[in-house]
C-alpha cells in the first residue's frame, strides 16, 4: 500500500522526529520504495507457522528478587545515572515545564 | 625482527610471553601507526595512554609470572561498546560527548584478560549501514585501492568498518565488531581479514548500544582464524546482566583448532547462486569448495528455499526493533538536547531526534514505526516473524545433511564510497548472503579467499550449527591454509 506525505508526517510524529515539508516529500519516495519491496513477504504461505520469538532456544531469566542484587545495575547510583543528563538539577532529570 | 605491527595476536602474545619484546614496545608501535593513519578516519577517539598503561601492567605481570591470556595485546574497540570514562557515540551526533560511567561486559572481559585499548573505532551510525558512510564523524576509508590506476576511495564495509580498516592497515592486530545483519562478516570480506559472529547469546550485549536486540551479537575481527578464536574465547561467556546470554561454558576454541575436515559434510546452498553475480565471486566459491574437499570434507548440495525472503524479513524486523530501542534518545537522560525557544516536552523530543539522528537512522526508525503501527503490525511485523521461523527451519533441515555451509560473504568486492548512497535498496542488497544466518542466530565467519580482477579482497563465508563455533573456525582454517591469502593494502595513508 502506498503511503502519502500525510502518512509520512504521521509516522514522524509517532516517532517523535521533527521533519520539514521537503524531508517529508523525499521520505515519501524512499519509504514507498522500501515498503513496496518488503511487501513480497505477503506471498509466503505462513499457515500454521508460529512467529519467532526466540532465535536460539533460551529461557529468559529474571533477576533475583533482591534489592541492589548487582552493584552495577542496582540502586544508589544517582550521580552516575545523572552524569550525562543534559539538564540535571537537584538530583533529578530536568525537562521543560509540562504543567501550566 | 619483523615489525611488531605485522604480528598477529597469537604472535604478540607468545612473543611477549617469551620475552622477545616488551608489551610497551608493542603498544608504542601500534600507537604510532594509529597516530599516522588519520587519513583512514578509522578511530573516533584515540586512547594511546590506555594502551600504554595496559602494556606496563602486562610487562609487570610477566616479571611477576602472572600473565593473562591477552597480556601485551593492544586492540581496537568498536565505538558501540560502552567504555567507562571514554566517550561512546555509536558514531552519532545524538551521543556525542556521552561518557559512560560503566563498562560493557565484553570490553571488561577483554581488559580483564590483559588487553589494552588503542581507541574507539568508527562505524556506521548506530551500526546502521554497510559502507561506513553514515557515521556522524565522517566516512571510514578502506586502505585498499583498485589496481586500475584509479584512486577511488573504497568502502571498508559496514557497520564495523573502522574495525576492518584499522586491522587491514595494521593499526591494531584485532578489534571488536558487532553483527546485526552482517556487520562483522561483510567488512571483513571487503578488507581481506577474518571475523566471526558467534551464536546469538554467546557474547553478552550488556553495555553495547542496542540496534536490533533479537539480532545483535558481538564478535571479534582479526587477521586470521586463530586470532578470532583467541579473541572470541576472551569475549564470550555467560552474563547474568543480559537476559539473552547463554548459560554455557566457553569452549577452548583455539586449542581445538584443526583443519582436518575428514568426515565433515559441507553444504552448498543452491539459492545463493544468484543470477548475474560477479563471476569472480562464483569462481572464488568454486575454489573454496575445492579447498574444503582437499581438507577431507564431503560436499553436498543443499536447499534453503526461503533465502530470497531473508532480506525483506530483516528490513522489517531490524527497523522495528531499532525504532523501539532508539526511543530512549529523547534529550532527557543522556546525549544531545535541542530545546527550541518556548518549546514544550514533545517539541523538545522531536527537535532533539531530528538533529541527533542521521538520515539512514531516521529512515529505519520511520520504517520501524510504520510496521509496528496500529493496523499494519500483523501485515508486516507478525508476517516477518513467521517468515523468520521458516528461514530458521530451512537451516535446521539443511543441517540434517551437512555440518557447515559454504557461501560467499558478499555479492561483490568493496565498492567506491558514494557509489551506492543514493539508493538505500541497492545498499541493503549487499548483505544478501550475510542476513540469513543472522536471522537464524547461527555462528558464521568470513575468511579472505581471493583477490578479484581489480586486486580487491573477496571473502568466503562459513555458516555453522548453533553453538558450533568450532566447526566454523575449523572450516575457516582449512580455507585459510589453502587460499594462502597474504595480499595486503599498499600504504598510501
Image (tube, coloured by chain):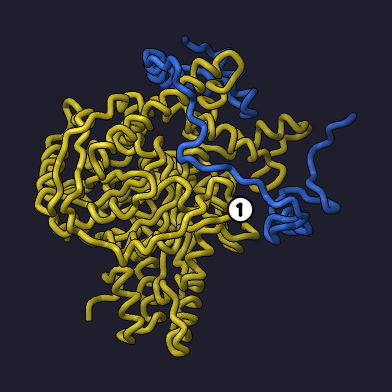
**Chain in blue (letter):** A
The quadrant of the image that shows the N terminus of chain B is bottom left
Can the viewer see residue B256? Answer: yes
Residue at x-position 31% and y-position 41%: B417
Colour of chain B in the image: yellow
Residue at x-position 62% and y-position 27%: A15
For mark 1, what is the residue?
B241
User: In this orientation, which residue lies closer to the viewer: B218 or B263?
Assistant: B263
Q: Position of residue B118 (x, y in %)?
A: 44, 67
- Give the class, few, some or many, for how many residues have Cα within 10 Å of label 1's Cα (few <14, many ≥20): some
User: Which element type, helix, strand or loop, lies under badge 1?
Assistant: loop
Farthest residue to the bottom: give it.
B63
Q: Is residue A40 left or right of residue B108?
A: left
Residue at x-position 58% and y-position 13%: B375
Q: Is residue B141 left or right of residue B2?
A: right
Q: Position of residue B102 (x, y in %)?
A: 63, 60
Specify the subunit that label 1 lies on. Answer: B
Q: Position of residue B334 (x, y in %)?
A: 67, 48
In the rendered image of this protein, does residue B75 appear above or below residue B88?
Answer: below
Q: Quadrant of residue B347?
A: top right
User: In this orientation, which residue lies closer to the viewer: B469 or B38?
Assistant: B469
In the rendered image of this protein, does residue B334 appear above or below residue B251?
Answer: above
The quadrant of the image that shows the C terminus of chain B is bottom left
Amino acid at each position: 500500500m502506498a503511503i502519502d506525505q500525510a502518512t509520512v508526517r504521521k509516522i514522524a510524529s509517532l516517532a517523535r522526529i521533527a521533519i520539514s515539508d521537503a524531508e517529508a516529500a523525499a521520505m515519501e519516495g524512499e519509504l514507498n520504495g522500501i515498503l513496496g519491496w518488503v511487501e513480497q513477504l505477503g506471498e509466503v504461505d505462513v499457515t500454521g507457522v508460529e512467529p519467532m520469538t526466540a532465535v536460539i532456544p533460551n529461557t529468559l531469566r529474571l533477576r533475583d528478587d533482591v534489592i541492589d542484587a548487582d552493584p552495577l545495575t542496582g540502586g544508589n547510583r544517582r550521580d552516575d545515572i545523572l552524569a550525562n543528563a543534559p539538564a540535571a538539577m537537584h538530583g533529578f532529570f530536568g525537562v521543560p515545564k509540562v504543567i501550566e | 625482527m619483523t615489525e611488531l605491527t605485522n604480528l598477529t595476536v597469537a604472535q604478540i602474545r607468545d612473543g611477549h610471553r617469551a620475552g622477545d619484546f616488551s608489551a610497551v614496545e608493542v603498544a608504542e608501535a601500534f600507537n604510532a601507526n594509529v597516530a599516522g593513519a588519520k587519513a583512514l578516519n578509522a578511530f573516533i577517539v584515540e586512547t594511546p595512554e590506555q594502551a600504554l598503561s595496559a602494556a606496563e601492567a602486562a610487562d609487570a605481570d610477566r616479571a611477576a609470572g602472572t600473565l593473562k591470556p591477552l597480556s601485551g595485546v593492544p586492540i581496537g574497540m568498536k565505538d558501540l561498546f560502552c567504555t567507562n570514562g571514554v566517550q561512546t557515540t555509536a558514531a552519532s551526533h545524538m551521543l556525542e560527548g556521552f561518557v559512560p560511567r560503566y563498562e560493557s561486559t565484553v570490553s571488561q572481559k577483554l581488559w580483564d584478560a590483559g588487553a589494552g585499548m588503542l581507541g574507539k573505532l568508527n562505524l556506521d551510525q548506530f551500526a546502521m549501514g554497510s559502507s561506513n558512510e553514515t557515521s556522524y564523524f565522517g566516512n571510514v576509508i578502506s586502505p585498499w585501492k583498485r589496481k586500475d590506476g584509479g584512486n577511488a576511495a573504497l568502502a571498508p564495509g559496514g557497520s564495523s568498518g573502522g574495525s576492518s580498516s584499522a586491522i587491514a592497515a595494521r593499526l591494531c592486530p584485532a578489534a571488536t565488531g558487532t553483527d546485526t545483519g552482517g556487520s562483522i562478516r561483510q567488512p571483513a570480506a571487503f578488507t581481506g581479514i577474518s571475523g566471526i559472529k558467534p551464536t546469538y547469546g554467546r557474547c553478552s550485549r550488556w553495555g553495547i548500544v542496542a540496534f536490533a536486540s533479537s539480532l545483535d551479537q558481538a564478535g571479534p575481527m582479526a587477521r586470521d582464524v586463530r586470532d578470532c578464536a583467541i579473541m572470541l574465547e576472551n569475549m564470550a561467556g555467560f552474563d547474568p546482566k543480559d537476559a539473552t546470554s547463554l548459560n554455557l561454558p566457553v569452549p577452548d576454541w583455539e586449542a581445538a583448532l584443526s583443519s582436518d575436515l575428514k568426515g565433515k559434510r559441507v553444504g552448498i546452498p543452491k539459492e545463493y547462486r544468484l543470477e548475474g553475480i560477479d563471476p569472480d565471486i562464483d569462481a572464488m566459491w568454486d575454489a573454496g569448495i575445492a579447498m574444503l574437499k582437499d581438507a577431507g570434507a564431503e560436499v553436498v548440495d543443499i536447499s534453503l528455499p526461503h533465502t530470497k525472503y531473508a532480506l525483506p524479513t530483516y528490513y522489517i524486523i531490524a527497523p522495528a526493533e531499532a525504532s523501539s530501542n532508539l526511543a530512549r534518545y529523547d534529550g532527557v537522560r543522556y546525549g544531545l538536547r535541542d530545546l527550541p525557544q518556548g518549546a514544550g516536552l514533545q517539541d523538545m523530543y522531536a527537535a532533539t531526534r531530528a538533529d541527533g539522528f542521521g538520515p539512514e537512522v531516521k529512515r529505519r526508525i520511520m520504517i520501524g514505526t510504520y510496521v509496528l503501527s496500529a493496523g499494519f503490525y500483523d501485515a508486516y511485523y507478525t508476517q516477518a516473524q513467521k517468515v523468520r521461523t521458516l528461514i530458521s527451519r530451512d537451516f535446521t533441515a539443511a543441517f540434517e545433511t551437512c555440518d557447515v555451509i559454504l557461501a560467499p560473504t558478499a555479492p561483490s568486492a568493496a565498492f567506491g564510497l558514494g557509489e551506492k548512497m543514493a539508493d538505500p535498496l541497492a545498499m541493503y542488497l549487499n548483505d544478501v548472503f550475510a542476513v540469513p544466518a543472522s536471522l537464524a542466530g547461527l555462528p558464521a565467519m568470513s575468511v579472505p579467499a581471493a583477490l578479484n580482477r581489480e586486486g580487491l579482497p573477496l571473502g568466503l563465508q562459513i555458516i555453522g550449527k548453533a553453538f558450533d563455533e568450532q566447526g566454523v573456525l575449523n572450516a575457516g582454517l582449512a580455507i585459510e591454509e589453502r587460499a594462502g591469502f597474504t595480499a595486503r593494502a599498499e600504504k598510501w595513508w
